[in-house]
Amino acid sequence: MNAPISYRHWAIDLAPKAAPALATTTVLVLGRIWNANGAEHSAGNAALMVVLATGAATAGAFASGGRSGDSVIAGTAFAASGGLALAGVAGYADGLSLPILLWALATAVAYGLAARYWRIDRRETVAHERQTLGRREDHAHVERVEALRAGAQIEVARSGAAYAEQLANALITRASLPGFNPQALTDAGLPELPAKHDH
Protein backbone atom coordinates (compact mmCIF):
# COMPACT_ATOMS: atom_id res chain seq x y z
CA MET A 1 0.00 0.00 0.00
CA ASN A 2 2.97 2.34 0.52
CA ALA A 3 4.10 4.36 -2.49
CA PRO A 4 7.50 3.37 -3.85
CA ILE A 5 10.35 5.70 -2.99
CA SER A 6 11.66 7.36 -6.13
CA TYR A 7 14.84 9.41 -6.46
CA ARG A 8 15.38 11.92 -9.22
CA HIS A 9 18.85 13.04 -10.17
CA TRP A 10 19.54 16.72 -9.39
CA ALA A 11 20.30 17.40 -13.06
CA ILE A 12 16.74 16.44 -14.02
CA ASP A 13 15.36 19.04 -11.61
CA LEU A 14 17.92 21.67 -12.67
CA ALA A 15 17.56 21.31 -16.46
CA PRO A 16 14.25 23.21 -16.84
CA LYS A 17 15.54 26.01 -14.60
CA ALA A 18 18.68 26.41 -16.73
CA ALA A 19 16.89 26.30 -20.10
CA PRO A 20 16.16 30.06 -20.45
CA ALA A 21 19.77 31.03 -19.66
CA LEU A 22 21.11 28.35 -22.01
CA ALA A 23 18.81 29.52 -24.81
CA THR A 24 19.75 33.19 -24.56
CA THR A 25 23.45 32.38 -24.12
CA THR A 26 23.37 30.15 -27.21
CA VAL A 27 21.79 32.97 -29.26
CA LEU A 28 24.43 35.43 -27.98
CA VAL A 29 27.31 33.06 -28.80
CA LEU A 30 25.95 32.32 -32.28
CA GLY A 31 25.46 36.05 -32.90
CA ARG A 32 29.06 36.78 -31.91
CA ILE A 33 30.31 33.95 -34.14
CA TRP A 34 28.27 35.45 -36.97
CA ASN A 35 29.82 38.85 -36.12
CA ALA A 36 33.33 37.38 -36.38
CA ASN A 37 32.47 35.91 -39.79
CA GLY A 38 31.49 39.18 -41.44
CA ALA A 39 28.07 40.24 -40.15
CA GLU A 40 29.47 43.34 -38.43
CA HIS A 41 28.22 46.52 -40.17
CA SER A 42 26.54 44.43 -42.91
CA ALA A 43 23.35 46.28 -43.86
CA GLY A 44 21.95 43.23 -45.67
CA ASN A 45 22.40 40.97 -42.64
CA ALA A 46 20.88 43.59 -40.33
CA ALA A 47 17.89 44.06 -42.66
CA LEU A 48 17.38 40.29 -42.82
CA MET A 49 17.30 40.00 -39.01
CA VAL A 50 14.91 42.98 -38.73
CA VAL A 51 12.53 41.39 -41.25
CA LEU A 52 12.70 37.97 -39.55
CA ALA A 53 12.22 39.41 -36.04
CA THR A 54 9.30 41.59 -37.22
CA GLY A 55 7.72 38.63 -39.00
CA ALA A 56 7.97 36.45 -35.89
CA ALA A 57 6.49 39.20 -33.71
CA THR A 58 3.63 39.69 -36.19
CA ALA A 59 2.94 35.94 -36.19
CA GLY A 60 2.87 36.03 -32.38
CA ALA A 61 0.42 38.93 -32.41
CA PHE A 62 -1.91 37.10 -34.80
CA ALA A 63 -1.62 33.87 -32.81
CA SER A 64 -2.54 35.58 -29.55
CA GLY A 65 -5.39 37.65 -30.98
CA GLY A 66 -9.02 36.64 -31.09
CA ARG A 67 -10.98 34.12 -29.10
CA SER A 68 -9.20 31.12 -30.58
CA GLY A 69 -5.71 32.47 -29.80
CA ASP A 70 -3.12 29.85 -28.96
CA SER A 71 -0.82 30.96 -26.14
CA VAL A 72 1.82 28.30 -26.91
CA ILE A 73 2.18 29.37 -30.56
CA ALA A 74 2.12 33.06 -29.58
CA GLY A 75 4.78 32.53 -26.90
CA THR A 76 6.96 30.58 -29.31
CA ALA A 77 6.64 33.27 -31.98
CA PHE A 78 7.48 36.08 -29.56
CA ALA A 79 10.44 34.10 -28.19
CA ALA A 80 11.70 33.56 -31.75
CA SER A 81 11.30 37.28 -32.45
CA GLY A 82 13.30 38.19 -29.35
CA GLY A 83 15.96 35.60 -30.18
CA LEU A 84 16.30 36.91 -33.73
CA ALA A 85 16.57 40.49 -32.49
CA LEU A 86 19.26 39.48 -29.97
CA ALA A 87 21.16 37.53 -32.64
CA GLY A 88 20.93 40.50 -35.01
CA VAL A 89 22.30 42.94 -32.43
CA ALA A 90 25.02 40.48 -31.35
CA GLY A 91 26.02 39.98 -34.98
CA TYR A 92 25.88 43.61 -36.07
CA ALA A 93 27.29 45.47 -33.03
CA ASP A 94 30.96 46.53 -32.70
CA GLY A 95 31.69 45.69 -29.07
CA LEU A 96 30.31 43.31 -26.47
CA SER A 97 28.59 45.80 -24.16
CA LEU A 98 25.30 46.17 -26.10
CA PRO A 99 24.95 42.41 -26.88
CA ILE A 100 25.66 41.51 -23.24
CA LEU A 101 23.16 44.12 -22.03
CA LEU A 102 20.51 42.71 -24.37
CA TRP A 103 21.45 39.16 -23.34
CA ALA A 104 20.91 40.05 -19.65
CA LEU A 105 17.59 41.70 -20.45
CA ALA A 106 16.42 38.76 -22.60
CA THR A 107 17.46 36.27 -19.90
CA ALA A 108 15.57 38.21 -17.21
CA VAL A 109 12.44 38.38 -19.39
CA ALA A 110 12.72 34.65 -20.21
CA TYR A 111 12.96 33.77 -16.51
CA GLY A 112 10.04 36.06 -15.71
CA LEU A 113 7.84 34.32 -18.28
CA ALA A 114 9.07 30.85 -17.35
CA ALA A 115 8.44 31.45 -13.64
CA ARG A 116 4.74 31.96 -14.37
CA TYR A 117 4.50 28.62 -16.18
CA TRP A 118 6.55 26.89 -13.47
CA ARG A 119 4.10 28.15 -10.82
CA ILE A 120 1.11 26.90 -12.86
CA ASP A 121 2.83 23.55 -13.44
CA ARG A 122 3.68 23.25 -9.73
CA ARG A 123 0.07 24.04 -8.77
CA GLU A 124 -1.24 21.41 -11.18
CA THR A 125 1.30 18.86 -9.90
CA VAL A 126 0.33 19.50 -6.26
CA ALA A 127 -3.39 19.27 -7.13
CA HIS A 128 -2.80 16.00 -8.98
CA GLU A 129 -0.80 14.57 -6.06
CA ARG A 130 -3.58 15.54 -3.63
CA GLN A 131 -6.22 13.89 -5.82
CA THR A 132 -4.09 10.77 -6.16
CA LEU A 133 -3.51 10.63 -2.40
CA GLY A 134 -7.23 11.10 -1.76
CA ARG A 135 -8.10 8.28 -4.16
CA ARG A 136 -5.50 6.03 -2.53
CA GLU A 137 -6.92 6.76 0.92
CA ASP A 138 -10.46 6.08 -0.30
CA HIS A 139 -9.38 2.77 -1.83
CA ALA A 140 -7.42 1.85 1.31
CA HIS A 141 -10.49 2.64 3.44
CA VAL A 142 -12.72 0.47 1.23
CA GLU A 143 -10.16 -2.34 1.37
CA ARG A 144 -9.97 -2.12 5.19
CA VAL A 145 -13.79 -2.18 5.50
CA GLU A 146 -14.01 -5.18 3.16
CA ALA A 147 -11.25 -6.97 5.07
CA LEU A 148 -13.07 -6.37 8.37
CA ARG A 149 -16.36 -7.55 6.86
CA ALA A 150 -14.75 -10.70 5.44
CA GLY A 151 -13.03 -11.36 8.77
CA ALA A 152 -16.33 -10.96 10.64
CA GLN A 153 -18.05 -13.38 8.25
CA ILE A 154 -15.25 -15.90 8.73
CA GLU A 155 -15.51 -15.56 12.51
CA VAL A 156 -19.30 -16.02 12.39
CA ALA A 157 -18.93 -19.11 10.20
CA ARG A 158 -16.15 -20.43 12.45
CA SER A 159 -18.17 -19.86 15.63
CA GLY A 160 -21.24 -21.48 14.01
CA ALA A 161 -19.18 -24.51 13.03
CA ALA A 162 -17.69 -24.70 16.51
CA TYR A 163 -21.19 -24.51 18.06
CA ALA A 164 -22.48 -27.24 15.76
CA GLU A 165 -19.49 -29.41 16.61
CA GLN A 166 -19.97 -28.86 20.34
CA LEU A 167 -23.69 -29.62 20.06
CA ALA A 168 -22.97 -32.84 18.15
CA ASN A 169 -20.38 -33.88 20.74
CA ALA A 170 -22.84 -33.14 23.56
CA LEU A 171 -25.56 -35.20 21.89
CA ILE A 172 -23.20 -38.09 21.25
CA THR A 173 -21.94 -37.95 24.82
CA ARG A 174 -25.48 -37.73 26.24
CA ALA A 175 -26.67 -40.61 24.05
CA SER A 176 -23.86 -42.82 25.28
CA LEU A 177 -24.73 -42.32 28.95
CA PRO A 178 -26.51 -45.24 30.67
CA GLY A 179 -30.23 -44.79 31.08
CA PHE A 180 -30.59 -42.21 28.28
CA ASN A 181 -34.04 -42.39 26.75
CA PRO A 182 -34.50 -40.40 23.55
CA GLN A 183 -38.26 -41.11 23.62
CA ALA A 184 -38.56 -39.18 26.91
CA LEU A 185 -37.07 -36.10 25.19
CA THR A 186 -39.53 -36.44 22.33
CA ASP A 187 -42.42 -36.80 24.74
CA ALA A 188 -41.28 -33.65 26.52
CA GLY A 189 -41.72 -31.71 23.25
CA LEU A 190 -38.11 -31.65 22.13
CA PRO A 191 -37.27 -32.55 18.55
CA GLU A 192 -36.80 -36.20 17.91
CA LEU A 193 -33.21 -37.38 17.84
CA PRO A 194 -32.04 -39.52 14.97
CA ALA A 195 -32.15 -43.21 15.74
CA LYS A 196 -28.83 -44.88 16.45
CA HIS A 197 -28.01 -47.41 13.79
CA ASP A 198 -25.79 -50.33 14.69
CA HIS A 199 -23.85 -51.77 11.81
Image (cartoon, grey):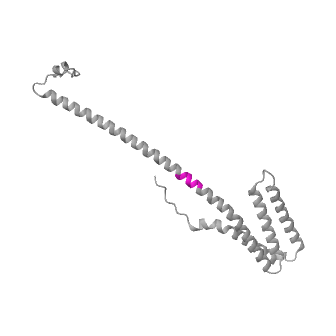
Where's residue 3, x and y in %?
A: 49, 55
Q: Nearer the viewer, residue 37 or 59?
A: 59
Residue 4 drawn above or below residue 109: above
Answer whether residue 128 is magenta in the image: yes
Where's residue 176, x and y in %?
A: 13, 28
Residue at position x 79%, y 67% in the image: 82
Q: Can residue 96 be seen?
A: no
Answer whether residue 132 is magenta in the image: yes
Q: Nearer the viewer, residue 30 or 143?
A: 143
Magenta stretch: give its range: 127-133
Q: From the image, give the main secondary structure of the stretch colored magenta.
A: helix
Residue at position x 30%, y 37% in the image: 158
- Whether residue 85 sits left or right of residue 161 in the image: it is right
Quarter of the picture holding the C terminus: top left
- Whether residue 132 sits left or right of residue 115 in the image: it is left
Quadrant housing residue 123: bottom right
Residue 108 drawn above or below residue 131: below
Where's residue 189, x and y in %?
A: 21, 20
Quadrant housing residue 168: top left
